[in-house]
Structure formats: structure tokens, C-alpha cells
């Protein structure tokens, strides 16, 4: 065996998967996982751990995989992560754990993410569940939002004996895992549902259809409903638009709308009532994970899809694996291109988009080279659908209805990193609501930190 | 699960239901709405809160069975349950936070078109309970489509019914009636609140602008989540993009870009929806569905 290259992971053929919503990556089987595990050097001073936001004992669990003790491997990971089946699939491993792997110096880094996924899937398929706390401490904590931050915080607190209720605005739990990331990357009924079940097994109650700030408020939860502390994990759900002419035309969607119709409301399945205007020729504006997901969804619904991104390929913020998959499936990348105007027909529908070519100039505040327009390079793309994927910011619904909760100029809730403590006593926050749109693992890490902070606060109170 | 406690046929195709939803009943205000999802596969359907009983923990909705989803909803009976009932959503009516002394001095006219009478009712009722007198015009295509008239009479100072075909009350649309009240009956109004099909709200707003009367309208664009997450409900108000589900649904009628909103509302209706609407409502649906005749 060539120790420099990783065991390839089986994937659905691009031609086939471009037409279905089943998972693209099929994952390792036990044999493949055990062989890949032998590539890990089980370093004493494991650099990979420093790249993982929740510091999973990576050599520790890989050692168990190699020995075939998959259940033990699961217990190792579980000490650090509540959502391994999710993180193994969607973490940007190439810029986190795998980027630091010693194996990566000469050859390919160990497939840490794929191994993690294998362990978590194995545990699910073999019915291994976390254990509920034996003694309850009688203290009540409310968790707002059921995304990775909320689920993790709730799970950790329940393990410590707290009586935890999650309040979720939508009709399903999971946050972005349910409404945003598509089925073909993160299966809902198997992976996401079972992660949510694992949290329920710990005794956490989930009340859906409750919009904090409207149905009730943080202040009321603390004062009238008898909660001793509150964790806010409400994410960054508010979509941005460009503010260019034609943006309110029919056929222009935010990526959130397009993905929500398809994932949460299951518009791709005709037996569900919610419709989607799939589009025949679609442009997705943006270059992040969200843009890739929207583009690949539109492709599966039958469209020709263009990614329109104003910088070059090396600046694409999406995960490398997603860009690679998107290309394999036939997504067309119009790079160094920026929309100027959406062209609208007399009935109010999109008929095209005027774009301009861009050049990369001097580095900007983010350290990336700033795109500048090439004068006179305007051209028209003929389209019937435009999906805006320009990022999101936190919804002010909670911050504007909670007395004494400070936010910054981006409307993000201010909370300290170590414990998630906000400016209001007994109120903690974490995840995208604090950082702005980030990653699953960072949200999870913040949920964990806040659970610790809340436990300390309530123990000393 | 949310249980249906009462069901009533108000008029041809228009139903009222009381739904047991204690959290919503406890915190809702006039002007707000809920999202109903009937079952696993159903859509999220936005419906205005028409009344509520905080003690009993129930919320009343009134809907017109116009398309696939609302027709399916009409088949639900007392004792059946909706899987999801989320709310209250949107902002409460601005009247509620207005200074009572100022409000007392004002003469207010509500203009309700078709099924739009349903959302008008709780606002008029609230005004009545606070001791304010308001007038109300209820407009519809014909007599059979008039809803909540008796209820409205109990809470409004004057109720004027207008039908396009003259089959009941004043013959003409709501705009004809506004002109009649202002020009012939010497009425003076400081504020108009118009709720009904977009086309009606558009023309009422054009008229009240001429008459110099500040006007509030309640917009009902297509929605998905109703929490500000998808942007499906966006509309232009005074040149700015707003999300109706969180910034509204009530806006200044003199600032709303109605033409854009009308086009946006057609988005999904052009497919299955329109076929059904055509079949059920005949040619009238292009008037906006209620037949209030606002499209002159
Ligand atoms: C399409 C898409 C693809 C992505 N791909 C990746 C990826 O590949 N890898 C990766 O690491 N990250 C990815 N991300 C980012 C990642 O999903 C988020 O960073 C993460 O989900 C944030 O978790 P959270 O718990 O803070 O918030 P969320 O997951 O956003 O959950 C917040 C929850 O709170 C609820 N809520 C909001 N307001 C209220 C309220 N007032 N009352 C009650 N409930 C409320 C929301 O409905 C939601 O369910 C992606 C994001 C999107 C949108
Ligand atoms: C804030 C708000 C309050 C509302 N209050 C009421 C009310 O009190 N009573 C009432 O009868 N109706 C009300 N509506 C309209 C009601 O939601 C629509 O009539 C209903 O969604 C139509 O669904 P359908 O499938 O039966 O009809 P169809 O017209 O066949 O619908 C086809 C498609 O169009 C979409 N759609 C069509 N019209 C609307 C619309 N106006 N809003 C959202 N989606 C739409 C639906 O998503 C559906 O997918 C309100 C809408 C909003 C936004
Ligand atoms: S959680 Fe993410 S960063 Fe950490 S080891 Fe797993 S894949 Fe790597
Ligand atoms: S750095 Fe790489 S080789 Fe070393 S322990 Fe981590 S995964 Fe194994
Ligand atoms: S309905 Fe989604 S943002 Fe208003």
C-alpha cells in the first residue's frame, strides 16, 4: 500500500448524481476505514488536534478504528463532539484538522473527516446512543434555536442533569442542517434526524413553532416561565441582497428561499405541497458553500447552472470538495464576473443579467485582492432564474426584544468566547448569532462552551 | 398538534376556525398573522389572526378556499388537528401603540375587501374595546361574499356595505363608497386602513392620496418561513426593500410599490394555482379574488 495517498472514498457517479438528491459521498466501509487508519502515525504531539475547533483526540479515535473497536472510537469522539456524523461530512477539514496533519507534508493527509463520519454512521446503524443523566438537578434552561449551537448546548446541559427545553421558530429542528444544507450532502431522515434524536434521548424537550421575540421573549422566559438561564443559538438567517436594479423580479431568490423550499419544504418531492420554480437557466451569485449548494440543487432540478463570482477560483470561500463536486457535475463557473443589473420582461420575470468582468487589484482588509471592474467589459447572460447567495446576518428579532442585550454594528450578539456570557445576566449566546455566518463545528464549539458557562453560573448562583 | 375547536362557514367558500394555540393566543395582537401547516406534506400558509381568546387559549382564522392548500384546509373538521401553528408573526397594528389622547381625536375609516374583512374585524373590535369609534366599509362582488357584517356592526360606529352589482347595500366598489362618504355625506377622516386584495389597496391608496388622508395597508405577499429568513415576502416601500413578514405586514399605502407586489404574488399562481383559480372563480380572479371591484 502506498502510504502517501489516502484510501479513495466511494462516490456516486457525477452523471447519475446530477439527477438525484441522494448522498454524493458514500463513505468508507469498515475495511477501508481500518486501512486508512493505519496511515495515521498516532503522533504524540498531534498537530491535527490543534486544527480542530473542538480539539477531538484524533489519534485516539483513529487508533480504535484501526483495531476495529468502532464503538470505543465513537465514545472517544463523543467526549468532544455531539454531531460527528454531521461534522465528518461538512467540516472544512482541508483548512482545519487535515491541513495540520503530518502526513500532509509529503503526501495526502489522513482522511480524518471520512473516518469520523464512518465511526458516527457505524454507531447510528448499530443503535449506540448517548446516556441520559441519572440525577436531575431541577434547574431549567431554555435554548433558543435548534441548529448545531443549540443542540450541542442543550445536549451538554442535559447530560449534567439540567431540565432543558429548546424553542425553535420553524416546524422542524436542526437549523441550517435541516433547511439549508441539501440532502445530497447531509441526509435529513438518517443523519440529521438521528442527531436530533440523540439529544432528545438525553431528556431535552424540543418545542417547535415558537418564535422568540414574538411568541414569547427572553425576558418572559426568565421572569414568567421559570427558566434559570437562557442560551441563544438563533443563527444568522437574514439574507443579503445586492441592491441592483431588477432584484425584486420574479425568478430572483435568496439562496435561503431556494434551499428552504427544497430542503425544509421538500419541493423536489412532488408529494409535498410547496412549489419551487426550478428554472431552466440559472445564475447563482456568490462563491461560498451556500452558493455551491444552491447551484447543485438547481442542477438536480434540471437547470443549466452558472456560478457568478467576482473574484478568482483561489478565492472561492466554498470548501474545496464542494467546488470539485460542483465542477464534476457540470456547474459552469463564470469567475471574475459581477452582476450589474437583472433584466426583466414585461410580465415581471427575469430574462437575463448584465454582468461586468473584474480584475484583481490590491489586497483589501480581508487580505484578498480586491476585485475591480474592467471598463467597457459589460455583457449579458440570458437567464430565467437568479439566486442571490451573498451571505447572511443575524436576525434582530431577539436582540431587539431583550432588555440589556448588547449587539455590535453587524447586529451580532456580543458574548465572550470562553463562556458565551452576554451583557445580560443569565443569558448566554453562541454560534452564527454571535460570529455571523461561520461553520457547524464553530457553532457546536460555542454551544459547548456556553453549556460550561451556564453550568458554572447556575452552580455558583 | 393544534386542535380545531370551532368551524363555521361565513360565506360561500369562506371559513372561520378557532384553533387551540395557547402560546399564540397569549401574546398576539391585532395586525399580526400565523403560519399554518396542516400536515407533514403541507405548505406553510400565512393567515391573519382574526380574533383571539386569551383565557380559552384559542385563535380565530378566516380563510377563503381559493387554491389547492386552502381547499384542503376547508375539509378539516372540529376535533381535527393541524401539525403546526406558528406565531404570532409580523408587527402589531401601529394603532395599538399610538398615544390614546391623539387617537381619540382622530376619525378613522376601515376599508375591508372580501376576505380582507377578517383581518379588519379584530382591529375594529380592539378600537371599540378601548373606547374609540370607527367607521367601516365592507366591499365585495355581491351579497353572498359579505362576511362578518353582524359582528362588525357590534363594534363599529357605522358599517357601510358596498357590492359591485348592487345586490346588497351601496351599489359600487369601496372607492365609490369612500367618495360618497367624503363628498356627499360630508364625512371627514384622518386615517384610512385598507385591507383586501392588492388591487383594491392600490386604488384606495391612490384615492386617499388625492384626498390627503394617510393610509395604512396590510400586504400579503408569498411567504415561506415568515421569520425574515428567506426574503420571499420582499416588497418595495418608499424605494426601500422591506420584508413583509418582519417589517410588516402593515405599511404606508402611499409608499408601497403595488405593481411590483402584484407581479410577485403571481409567481406561483401562474402554475397549478391559476388553473384552479380559473376553474373555481371564473374570470373574477384577475380582479384579485374578492371581487370588491377595486380594479377600476
Ligand atoms: C446552505 C448552507 C451550507 C452550509 N455549508 C456548510 C458546510 O459545508 N460546512 C460548515 O461547517 N458550515 C456550513 N454552513 C454554515 C453552518 O451551517 C452554520 O454556521 C451553522 O449551522 C450555524 O449554527 P447555529 O446553531 O449557530 O445556527 P443555525 O444552524 O442557523 O440555527 C439557528 C436556529 O435558530 C432558529 N431561530 C432563529 N431565530 C429564532 C427565534 N427568534 N426563535 C426561535 N428560534 C429561532 C432558526 O430557525 C434555526 O433553526 C452552511 C450554511 C448554509 C446556509
Ligand atoms: C400576512 C398574510 C396574511 C394572510 N391572511 C389571510 C387571511 O386571513 N385569509 C385568507 O384567506 N388568506 C390570507 N392570506 C393569503 C393566503 O395565505 C393564501 O390565500 C394562501 O396561501 C393560498 O394558498 P392556496 O394553495 O390555497 O392557493 P393558490 O393560490 O393555489 O396558491 C398557489 C401557490 O401560491 C402561493 N400563494 C398564493 N397566494 C399567496 C398569498 N397571498 N400569500 C402567500 N402565498 C400565496 C402559495 O404558496 C401556493 O404555493 C394571507 C397571506 C399573508 C402573506
Ligand atoms: S470535528 Fe471537524 S475539524 Fe474536528 S476532527 Fe472532525 S472533521 Fe476535523
Ligand atoms: S497529525 Fe495526522 S498522522 Fe499525526 S495523529 Fe494527526 S492524523 Fe494522525
Ligand atoms: S417569508 Fe421568508 S423572509 Fe418573509
Image: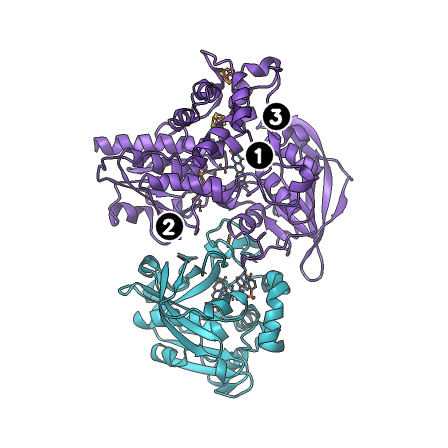
Chain colours: A purple, B cyan
Instruction: Tell me which label, 3 or 2, sits earlier in the chain.
Output: 3
> Can you give x and y, in whole percent of width and height, for residue B156 in the image?
37, 77
As helix, strand or loop, the secondary structure at mark 1 comes to strand
Q: Residue at x 62, y 15 (%)?
A: A2
The quadrant in which residue A290 appears is top right
Could you say which is closer to the camera, residue B243 or residue A428?
Answer: A428
Residue A26 marker: 1
Q: Quadrant of the C terminus of chain A?
A: top left
Nearer the observer, A405 or A131: A131
Residue at the (55%, 77%) spot, across then down: B291
- The image shows residue A201 at horizontal and vertical percentages of 34, 40
Nearer the observer, disc 1 or disc 2?
1
Q: Which picture quadrant has residue B26?
A: bottom left
Q: Up-down: is A116 above or below B257?
A: above
For the question of whether residue B45 can be seen, the reply is yes
- Whichever of labels 1 and 2 marks the residue nearer the N terminus, that label is 1
Residue A422 visible somewhere in the drawing: no
Q: What residue sits right under mark 2 in the picture? A: A213
Any atom of ligand 1 within 8 Å of the CB at mark 2?
Answer: yes
Residue ID for mark 3: A8
For mark 3, name the chain. A
Residue A26 relative to residue A53: left or right: right
- Chain letter for mark 1: A
Which residue extends farthest top? A44
- Picture coordinates of residue A54, whole percent (x, y): 43, 26
A87, A309: nearer the viewer: A87
Q: In the displayed structure, would residue A255 be above or below residue A156? A: below
Disc 1 residue lies near ligand 1 with CB under 8 A: no
Amino acid at each position: 500500500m502506498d502510504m502517501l495517498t489516502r484510501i479513495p472514498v466511494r462516490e456516486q457517479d457525477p452523471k447519475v448524481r446530477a439527477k438525484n438528491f441522494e448522498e454524493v459521498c458514500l463513505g468508507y466501509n469498515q475495511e477501508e476505514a481500518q486501512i486508512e487508519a493505519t496511515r495515521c502515525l498516532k503522533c504524540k504531539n498531534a498537530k491535527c488536534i490543534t486544527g480542530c475547533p473542538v480539539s477531538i483526540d484524533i489519534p485516539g479515535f483513529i487508533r480504535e478504528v484501526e483495531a476495529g473497536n468502532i464503538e470505543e472510537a465513537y465514545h472517544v469522539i463523543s467526549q468532544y463532539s455531539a454531531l460527528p456524523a454531521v461534522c465528518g461530512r461538512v467540516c472544512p477539514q482541508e483548512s482545519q484538522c487535515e491541513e495540520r496533519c503530518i502526513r500532509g507534508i509529503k503526501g495526502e493527509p489522513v482522511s480524518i473527516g471520512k473516518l469520523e463520519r464512518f465511526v458516527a454512521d457505524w454507531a447510528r446503524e448499530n443503535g449506540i446512543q448517548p446516556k441520559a443523566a441519572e440525577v436531575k438537578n431541577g434547574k431549567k434552561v431554555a435554548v433558543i434555536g435548534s441548529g448545531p449551537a443549540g443542540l450541542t448546548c442543550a445536549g451538554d446541559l442535559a447530560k449534567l442533569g439540567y431540565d432543558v427545553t429548546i424553542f425553535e421558530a420553524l416546524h422542524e429542528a436542526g437549523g441550517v442542517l435541516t433547511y439549508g444544507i441539501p440532502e445530497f450532502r447531509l441526509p435529513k431522515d438518517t443523519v440529521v434526524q438521528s442527531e436530533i434524536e440523540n439529544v432528545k434521548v438525553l431528556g431535552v424537550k424540543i418545542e417547535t413553532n415558537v418564535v422568540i421575540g414574538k411568541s414569547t421573549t427572553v425576558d418572559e422566559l426568565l421572569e414568567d416561565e421559570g427558566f434559570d438561564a437562557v442560551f441563544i443559538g438563533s443563527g444568522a438567517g437574514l439574507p443579503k441582497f445586492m441592491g441592483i436594479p431588477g432584484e425584486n423580479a420574479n425568478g430572483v431568490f435568496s439562496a435561503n428561499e431556494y434551499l428552504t423550499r427544497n430542503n425544509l419544504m421538500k419541493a423536489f418531492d412532488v408529494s409535498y405541497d410547496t412549489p419551487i420554480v426550478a428554472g431552466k437557466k440559472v445564475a447563482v451569485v456568490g462563491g461560498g458553500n451556500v452558493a455551491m449548494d444552491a447551484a447543485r440543487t438547481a442542477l438536480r432540478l434540471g437547470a443549466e447552472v452558472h456560478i457568478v463570482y467576482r473574484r478568482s477560483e483561489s478565492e472561492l470561500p466554498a470548501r474545496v470538495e464542494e467546488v470539485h463536486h460542483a465542477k464534476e457535475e457540470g456547474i459552469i463557473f463564470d469567475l471574475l464576473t459581477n452582476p450589474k443589473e437583472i433584466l426583466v420582461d414585461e410580465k415581471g420575470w427575469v430574462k437575463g443579467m448584465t454582468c461586468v468582468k473584474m480584475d484583481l487589484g490590491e489586497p483589501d482588509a480581508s487580505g484578498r485582492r480586491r476585485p475591480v471592474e474592467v471598463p467597457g467589459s459589460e455583457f449579458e447572460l440570458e437567464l430565467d432564474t437568479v439566486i442571490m447567495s451573498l451571505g447572511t446576518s443575524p436576525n434582530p428579532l431577539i436582540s431587539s426584544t431583550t432588555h440589556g442585550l448588547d449587539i455590535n454594528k453587524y447586529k451580532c450578539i456580543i458574548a465572550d468566547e470562553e463562556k458565551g456570557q452576554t451583557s445580560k445576566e443569565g443569558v448566554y449566546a453562541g454560534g452564527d448569532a454571535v460570529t455571523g455566518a461561520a461553520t457547524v463545528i464553530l457553532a457546536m464549539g460555542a454551544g459547548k462552551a456556553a453549556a460550561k458557562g451556564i453550568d458554572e453560573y447556575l452552580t455558583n448562583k | 398538534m393544534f386542535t380545531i375547536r370551532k368551524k363555521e362557514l361565513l360565506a360561500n367558500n369562506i371559513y372561520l376556525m378557532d384553533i387551540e394555540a395557547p402560546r399564540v393566543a397569549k401574546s398576539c395582537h391585532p395586525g399580526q398573522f400565523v403560519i399554518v401547516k396542516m400536515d407533514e406534506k403541507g405548505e406553510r400558509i400565512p393567515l391573519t389572526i382574526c380574533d383571539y381568546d386569551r383565557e380559552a387559549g384559542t385563535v380565530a382564522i378566516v380563510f377563503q378556499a381559493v387554491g389547492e392548500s386552502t381547499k384542503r384546509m376547508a375539509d378539516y373538521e372540529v376535533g381535527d388537528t393541524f401539525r403546526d401553528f406558528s406565531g404570532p408573526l409580523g408587527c402589531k397594528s401601529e394603532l395599538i401603540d399610538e398615544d390614546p389622547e391623539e387617537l381619540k381625536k382622530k376619525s378613522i375609516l376601515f376599508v375591508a375587501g372580501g376576505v380582507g374583512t377578517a383581518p379588519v374585524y379584530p382591529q375594529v373590535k380592539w378600537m371599540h374595546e378601548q373606547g374609540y369609534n370607527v367607521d367601516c366599509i365592507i366591499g365585495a362582488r355581491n351579497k353572498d361574499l359579505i362576511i362578518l357584517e353582524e359582528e362588525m356592526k357590534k363594534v363599529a360606529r357605522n358599517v357601510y356595505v358596498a357590492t359591485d352589482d348592487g345586490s346588497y347595500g351601496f351599489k359600487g366598489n369601496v372607492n365609490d363608497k369612500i367618495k360618497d362618504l367624503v363628498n356627499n355625506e360630508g364625512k371627514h377622516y384622518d386615517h384610512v386602513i385598507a385591507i383586501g386584495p392588492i388591487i383594491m389597496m392600490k386604488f384606495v391608496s391612490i384615492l386617499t392620496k388625492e384626498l390627503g388622508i394617510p393610509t395604512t395597508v396590510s400586504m400579503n405577499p408569498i411567504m415561506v418561513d415568515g421569520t425574515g429568513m428567506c426574503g420571499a415576502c420582499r416588497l418595495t416601500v418608499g424605494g426601500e426593500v422591506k420584508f413583509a413578514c418582519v417589517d410588516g405586514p402593515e405599511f404606508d399605502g402611499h409608499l408601497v410599490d403595488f405593481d411590483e407586489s402584484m407581479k410577485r404574488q403571481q409567481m406561483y399562481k401562474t402554475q397549478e394555482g391559476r388553473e384552479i383559480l380559473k376553474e373555481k372563480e371564473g374570470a373574477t380572479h384577475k380582479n384579485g379574488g374578492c371581487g370588491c371591484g377595486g380594479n377600476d
